[in-house]
Image (cartoon, rainbow, N blue to C red):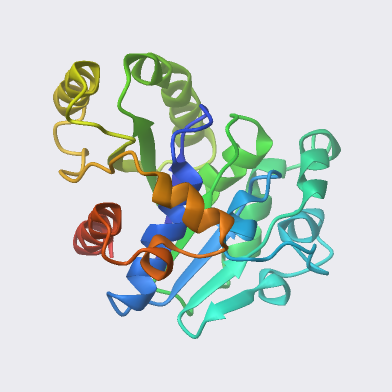
Amino acid sequence: MKIITFANHKGGVGKTTTVANIGYALAHHHKKKILIVDMDPQTNLTTHFGIYERPDKTIYEVLKGVASIHETILKISPSFHLVPSSLDVTNSESELQSVTGREFLLHEAIRNVHEYDAILIDTPPSLGVLTVNAFTASTDICIVVQTEFFALQGLAKLYEIISLVQKRTNPKLVISGVIATMFDKRKGMHCEALQALESQFVNELFPIQVSEAIALAEAASAGKSIFEYKPTSKVAEQYDELAQAIAKKLL
């Protein structure tokens, strides 16, 4: 089973939207059983599917050791499940600092979860203990990058943390994919940024770019995937193609 973390320490790059829609497409269009895990205290992945009230048990209780992953799982559909987050996860960064082996808490929690084809993890826009937990638990990383140069320049710190995790807690971790988001081919700077990504990630960059689209934000606000909200849109087609490429490459 693949455990794939979608990462970027820069916020606003479409990471949560990507996890939500690729997860949905893999489950509903490509016949995979998928678990998505919300590690972000902003809870955007959780609310993306219309869950606005705090569930009794979330990833916070899992990290604290008072609940199992299976106790937190919410069934969005028969083949598409979610481990929700809560605002309490904000406290994890400080609460876990003194815990021995804190980098392995998520790994320990999901090591007996075998009933899925893949687990997709959404991480906060930071490189603290929550993101390190996700990296330590994962087999693969997909970096989500907005097609602008400032976003590219900020990847150095992300590489540094990935390298440390590979050395210290998860030597088998690999960067398996890079996803370009918020792309507008009419903008020269976006095209230049895409060319830079193509040069830097020759084997990792997926050949499908996700366009800028207000429908993605509207779908999230409605508590739906883009496939439920606007299934004939260009961006829905792009996310479906991305899901198919990920399934072919990683699953």
Name the residue located 37 percent from the left edge and 59 percent from the top edge: 22
Name the residue located 68 percent from the left edge and 52 percent from the top edge: 105
State whether residue 156 is above or below residue 181.
above
- Of all residues, the one furthest to the bottom in this rendering is 78
**Res. 99 in view:** no
Total marks shown come to: 0
* 97 to the left or right of 139: right
**Res. 98 in view:** yes
Residue 220 locus on image (x, y percent): 53, 55
Name the residue located 49 percent from the left edge and 86 percent from the top edge: 78
Residue 119 locus on image (x, y percent): 47, 63
* 187 to the left or right of 147: left
Name the residue located 23 percent from the left edge and 54 percent from the top edge: 234
State whether residue 76 is above or below residue 164.
below
Dividing the picture into quadrants, the one containing residue 229 is: bottom left
Q: Nearer the viewer, residue 246 or 193?
A: 193
Dividing the picture into quadrants, the one containing residue 211 is: top left
State whether residue 189 is above or below residue 106.
above
